[in-house]
Image (cartoon, rainbow, N blue to C red):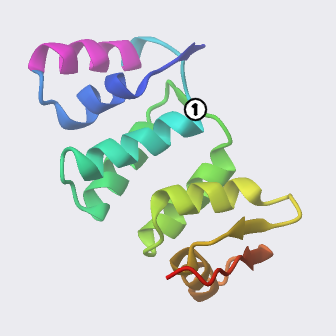
């Protein structure tokens, strides 16, 4: 199995460089590939930030990649859960970090938005909201 870098997935997902898109497509079709959680995180960040894709477009492209028969994903269950939370409005990085904490004692954050979104989504994890007097 070959671990794939974000730039290969970006070329496949956005096809902004025809030559590299073709190479990436052929590579993904012909090789058993492993995608790490950090690559999925970076892919979401690049698609939303650099390419200004909507949340729905980011989700569609990532889920398409994950359905390729040659692709495996590190921590599949937790990443898929994070994608579901992202689809429901949570920041993807927050969702991935929170999903990664499942099975541990809990998750601690200063991020009130993350805490509120997790509550709204009824996330089943102990979340400690660290508070500060800093404004």
Counting the numbered discs, the total is: 1
Residue 108 in percent (x, y) is at: 73, 67
Residue 125 in percent (x, y) is at: 77, 73
Residue 133 in percent (x, y) is at: 61, 84
Q: Is residue 26 above or below residue 54?
A: above
Q: Is residue 68 above or below residue 49?
A: above
How crowded is the residue under tag 1: few (<14 C-alpha within 10 Å), some, or many (20+)? some
Residue 80 visible from this viewpoint: yes
22 inside magenta stretch: yes
Residue shown at the point (54%, 37%) measured from the top left? 38
Tag 1, which secondary structure?
A: loop
Q: Which residue is mark 1?
A: 36
Q: Main secondary structure of the magenta part?
A: helix
Q: Is residue 126 above or below residue 25?
A: below
Please state which of residues 69 and 3 is positioned toward the viewer in this rendering.
Answer: 3
The N terminus, quarter of image: top right
Q: Residue 122: which quarter of the image? A: bottom right
Side (left or right) of 69 relative to 111: left
Q: Residue 89: which quarter of the image? A: bottom left
Q: Residue 64: which quarter of the image? A: top left
Side (left or right) of 114 relative to 122: left
Residue shown at the point (52%, 65%) measured from the top left? 84
Residue shown at the point (64%, 44%) measured from the top left? 76
Please state which of residues 116 and 2 is positioned toward the viewer in this rendering.
Answer: 116
Q: Please report the bounds of the magenta region as a residue range.
A: 18-28
Residue 34 in percent (x, y) is at: 56, 24
């Amino acid at each position: 199995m070959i671990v794939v870098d974000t730039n290969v997935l970006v070329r496949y997902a956005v096809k902004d460089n025809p030559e590299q898109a073709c190479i990436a497509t052929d590579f993904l079709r012909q090789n058993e590939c492993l995608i790490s959680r950090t690559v999925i995180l970076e892919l979401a960040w690049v698609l939303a930030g650099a390419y200004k894709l909507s949340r729905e477009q980011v989700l569609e492209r990532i889920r398409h990649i994950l359905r390729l028969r040659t692709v495996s994903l590190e921590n599949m269950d937790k990443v898929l859960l994070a994608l579901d939370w992202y689809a429901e409005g949570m920041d993807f990085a927050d969702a991935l970090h929170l999903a990664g904490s499942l099975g541990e004692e809990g998750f601690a954050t200063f991020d009130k938005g993350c805490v509120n979104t997790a509550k709204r989504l009824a996330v089943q994890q102990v979340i400690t909201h660290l508070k500060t007097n800093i404004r």
